[in-house]
Image (tube, helix red, strand yellow):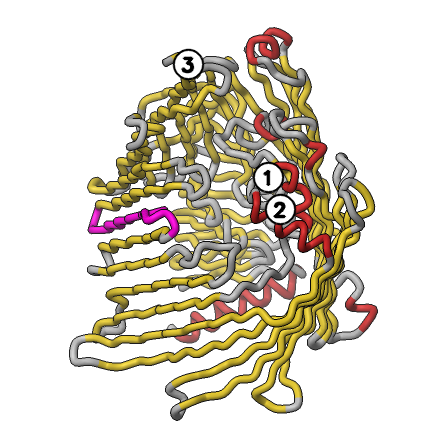
Amino acid sequence: MFFRLFLGLLISFCILEANGQKVEILAKNVEKQLNVIHAKNDVVLYSDKYIITADEAYYDQNSSDLELIGDITILEGSEFSTKSGYAKLNLKTDSGHLSPMFAYTGTSQLWLKCDNANFDDKYYMTRKSFISSCDVQDPEWKIGFSTGEYNREAKFMSMYNVLFYAGDVPVFYLPYFSFPTDKTRRSGLLRPSYGYSGGEGLYYLQPIYFAPMANWDLQIDPQIRTSRGTGVHATLRFIDSKYSTGEIKFGQFNEKEQYVIENDLKNDKHYGYSVEYDKSRLFSDFISSDTQDGLWVNFNYLNDINYLNTMDNEEKTYPSIVPSTLNYYMKKDLNYFGLYSKYYIETDEKEDDDKTIQELPTLHYHRVTNNIFLDNIFYSVDYKSTNYTSKTGIEAKTHQVNAPISIYFPLLNDFLHFKFTENFYMAKFDYEEGVNGDGGSTIQNSHKFSLYTELAKSYEDFFHTLYLSTDYIVPGQSKKSDFFIELEDAMLEDPTSKDLVEVRETVSVVSNEEESLNLNLVEYFYNTSGEKILSHAMRQSLFFSDFKYKYGDLENSLKVYFSKDLTIGNLLKYSHEHSRVSKFQTSVNLDIDEYKVAFLHTYLQDSRTDEKSNFLTFRLNTDYIKNYNFIAGMNYDIKDGFFKSWDAGWTMNKKCWNYRIVYREERTPNGSTDGYIKNRGVYLTFNLVPIGGIKYNFTKETGITE
């Protein structure tokens, strides 16, 4: 028996050498007649491209024809395999025939089966086939097609006369459908977005993706809103080095004349562009190996906020002020250098864009904290110079220097820790235009005395840690020019003066250290297993100057961990000045088995306007049925007695497909009338894994006058 097996192996190796082909055949029984090798019983064949198993095989050395019979498995690399009962292929031309065929792609977990298939060195061609990623015996979805082509190199499937099935029920027909079976970047159409809105009509956005090279791609997003207009936006992404990435977005949306009139829009065209670029090691490689530097650019331009609102159909809230930023830094050893610029575009039509203060640019130097003279003496230096400008004529240059020096002492055998900090601050403001006076300068110093302790103790049933600290800040000498003295007097007289707003913005960073005492407490409790059971923090400040009320708001936060499933927390802020609670927020998070509940109650009262807010937020997620979740949520305004928003929906998530359907209602104030706008919508997401799916939104907007 051993001799026969050895003889079979010897013949196999002879085939490899005789024909020049890297082909090896192993089997329990191997015979050779002229140029034909006949192998049977546990046949295993190795070649440059395939690993094949079968019950029986015939291999012609001259023609390289291979005939396989019975329980055939063909592995093509590690990600694609086929099974069949009969196969014939030529190892030279890499072509052949299989019947029937069952194919599986490991990356996408898709399977395909058909009665027979032909293939060449580039394609598998199939007829009357089915494909799916669900269970083979009883798939929940499948796609049937009359003819199909699978590109073996590009890993791309193309199908003709396509019929989508839910179980065994046909539901949708397409004359042609194609998709990739792996995650390789390639050009083509991406998943479209659909929707309907009562005010905008039907919505359709079809992304077109171009990926000609590995280091850049381009996505173009044309869209149509039948009752509103049309637009196109584009995104160019690129990598120009292994240390940098970039993205450029641009586009335009054109409104229909009737929509502009009905909605009283400022512009009938919304356009803009943005540039993001992030690069590390910009110059550091040319300086020294221990130098770090980086550049960050985020530039935005738009003619109004609707440029952002019309980029897609997602529910998003954008800030009224859109910033542009350019930052560069360099760090070496303990020295940090920075160059920053900020430019703001005001998109709120009610606000005066000319009054917006721009920061062009800011120069920054920082010396990282380090010891000096002795190990317990530390110092740092921070310098900033900023140029402020606005269209109203405000032109200012500021220079600020912060230089704290600290000394640290442990006390009572490390039971207490003491730190004294002497801070020196200098500032100079030069107003070139827009302000009466040329500006001013100030030189100040302050003393900070810090005493803190960190304690930990183990008890029989729990473990307790405690941090206590007190910081006493005392202003030192202060020398100010007349400009600062007059500004402080004016702010004391009328802190909300609109005439001072622009000037105050440029000097808001002035270090006005006030005599104060800050008390802090932080503590944690743990059970014997090391799990957190309670956390508590408290903060109170006392002020001894004329600028603020004597007592700052008392802040107290408490969180109780009843178990890993239930957590209750509370945040309280109490205003001594107004003798009332300024913020009271309670949260409950429950996660028990199939139920997840999040509850949040928030009460706020603004200290300046006395405006109150009182609302409830609630989220529920249940998965009491495997793979199926019921979701719901609401935001209720207790003060005005109405639901600001609520939603309810259903999600299903299985290995081979998922969907999400949600109904949502929300109310937003109508700025032009004494009423509100009510939005109602159904949001559907449907996805076949790994092929993709669709997103569909159906919304209706109603204006209601109270």
**In 3D space, how far apart are the residues under numbered discs 2 and 1 (Cα atoms)?**
9 Å
Magenta range: 577-594
Q: Identify the mark at residue 490; answer none if there is no mark.
A: 2
Q: Residue at x 26, y 36 (%)?
A: 630
Q: Nearer the viewer, mark 2 or mark 1?
A: 2
Q: Is residue 700 visible?
A: yes
Three-letter amino acid code of the residue under disc 1: Ser
Q: Determine the secondary structure under disc 2.
A: helix
Three-letter amino acid code of the residue under disc 2: Ala
Mark 3 highlights which residue? 702
Q: Quadrant of the N terminus?
A: bottom left
Q: Residue at x 46, y 25 (%)?
A: 145
Q: Is residue 39 left or right of residue 157?
A: left
Mark 1 highlights which residue? 497
- Image vertical order of residue 357 relative to residue 259, above or below: below
Q: Earlier in the sequence, mark 1 or mark 3?
A: 1
- Image vertical order of residue 212 relative to residue 589, above or below: above
Q: Quadrant of the C terminus?
A: top left
Q: Residue at x 41, y 14 (%)?
A: 702
Residue positioned most to the top: 258
